[in-house]
Image (spheres, rainbow, N blue to C red):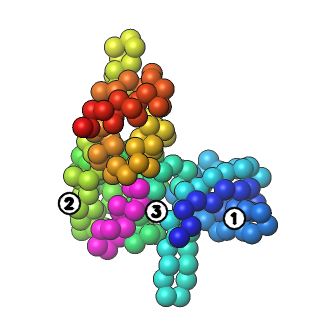
Amino acid sequence: MIAHVSGIVVEKFGSAVIVDVSGVGYEVQLAAGDFDATLLDSKIKFYTYHHIREQSQELFGFTSLVAKKLFELLITVQGVGPKAALAILSLGETEIVRSAIASSDAAFITKASGVGKKTAERVIVDLSDKVGHATRTDIDGMGLSRVIAVNDEALEALMALGYNLSDATRALEGISTELSTAARVTQALRGSK
């Protein structure tokens, strides 16, 4: 299994990029947001999902571990393959998609290319309890509520330690984002005992 690819982006086409890793080019399929943000000749790291079928192999890439984990959850749903999961993730930032699933917004999911009403409802039924709460907010130093950043390193660290997306989200609720990543992870681990 190829867990990640790190190298220079040498080509962009369709919804894929080719990443040169020490002279070997890996074609990586991306969600729309990641594709748009990726620049030619830039050094990049993608967390990857290596999809193997009888007649082909494909790499699906994500700039965040959270997006990869959500993708892996999506493909567990009957009728949702890697292309449909990528189309769902292309609807917006990972947090927006996750929140839509958590809040049972099937209409939002049906906006994805190739995803019909029945499939969207199946995604909601199968995953709404696995992706955490619909809104993750934090109170900043001035008492203002705000959404936790999508590329939350503490969330990714908890997931790397074996937490699923839902449990990692819950563990970080109420912990200030003003703290360092290490302090937030430590508090989350202490709170989960």
**Disc on the earlier residue, 1 or 2:** 1
Q: Is residue 56 left or right of residue 143?
A: right
Residue denoted by label 1? 18
- Residue type, mark 3 in image: Leu
Q: Which mark is residue 86?
A: 3
When asked about the image quadrant of residue 113, the answer is: bottom left
- Element type where label 3 sits in the image: helix
Q: Position of residue 153 (x, y in %)?
A: 48, 38
Quarter of the picture containing the C terminus is top left
Q: Is residue 97 magenta?
A: no
In magenta, the rendered stretch is 69-80
Q: Position of residue 26 (x, y in %)?
A: 67, 68
Under tag 1, what secondary structure? Answer: strand
Task: Please state the horizontal and vertical placement of residue 182, each as a whole percent of the image.
Answer: 47, 31
Task: Tell me the distance, in whole angstroms, between the alpha carbons under discs 1 and 2.
Answer: 36 Å
Q: Earlier in the sequence, mark 2 or mark 3?
A: 3
Residue at the spot of label 2: 125
